[in-house]
Amino acid sequence: MWTEEDQAQLLAIARKSIENGLQSGKPLVPETETASNPLQAIRASFVTLTLNQNLRGCIGSLEAHRPLINDVAANAYSSAFKDPRFPPVSAEELEKITVEISILSPMEPMQANDEQDLLAQLQPSIDGLLIDDGRHRATFLPQVWSQLPEPALFLNHLKRKAGMPLESWPDTMQCYRYHCDKFREQTA
């Protein structure tokens, strides 16, 4: 669905937004009128930054609410400067950072009566997962399966990320799956 030209444009916008943040302290606001129709579509995205193959920032939108090109620009900026797990990206780091973009499908509600029911429904390496118990909420993109390939381990780490007790499954628990189209900068 995403042409090489669209992918290249989104990756360039992400990098330019981070550069703009270094220069002005603000994200880039791209020209949506000149973008291809897919890039003007209202879509949700995540931008993941890695440095030496280690996570350096990852921020995104779970729900589509603006044109994809704007979502990528805003999330690239936030990944570089607003991810609370990391200090802001420096100009020196930017040269070595790899940008990856994940474009999310719409959320699909899952009917899970308990944790075992959810685990049986998960598709490792395919599903992204959002869990929400009304007080805590967290998501893992599908690419997290490469580090946590066992469904129970994947879910426990996600519950920990959300701040949920590992042993509980509240009646208010809501689960959503989604898929991603992802692409990244080519590294030398």
Image (tube, rainbow, N blue to C red):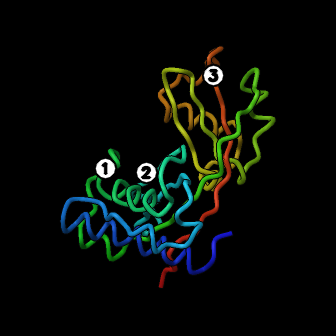
Where residue 70 appears, as percent x and y from the top left, is 43, 60
Disc 1: which residue: 82
User: Do the CB atoms of the residues marked 1 and 2 lie less than 8 Å apart?
Assistant: yes
Q: Identify the amino acid type marked 1.
A: Lys
Q: Residues within 10 Å of mark 1 (few under 14, many from 20)?
A: some
**Left or right side of 115 for 69:** left
Q: CA distance from mark 2 to mark 3?
A: 23 Å
Extreme left residue here? 24
Residue drawn 53% across the image and 44% down it: 62
Mark closer to the chain start, 1 or 3: 1
Vertical placement of residue 29 versus 8, above or below: above
- Return the residue nearer the eye: 47 or 38: 38
Q: Identify the amino acid type marked 3.
A: Met
Q: Which mark is residue 59?
A: 2
Quadrant where the N terminus sits is bottom right
User: Do the CB atoms of the residues marked 1 and 3 lie less than 8 Å apart?
Assistant: no
- Return the residue nearer the eye: 19 or 123: 19
Q: Identify the amino acid type marked 2.
A: Ile
Extreme front residue here? 33
Where residue 185 appears, as percent x and y from the top left, is 50, 75
- Return the residue nearer the eye: 184 or 64: 64
Disc 3: which residue: 173
Disc 3 on helix, strand or loop? Answer: loop
Vertical placement of residue 64 versus 131, above or below: below
Q: CA distance from mark 1 to mark 2?
A: 8 Å
Where residue 132 appears, as percent x and y from the top left, is 57, 28
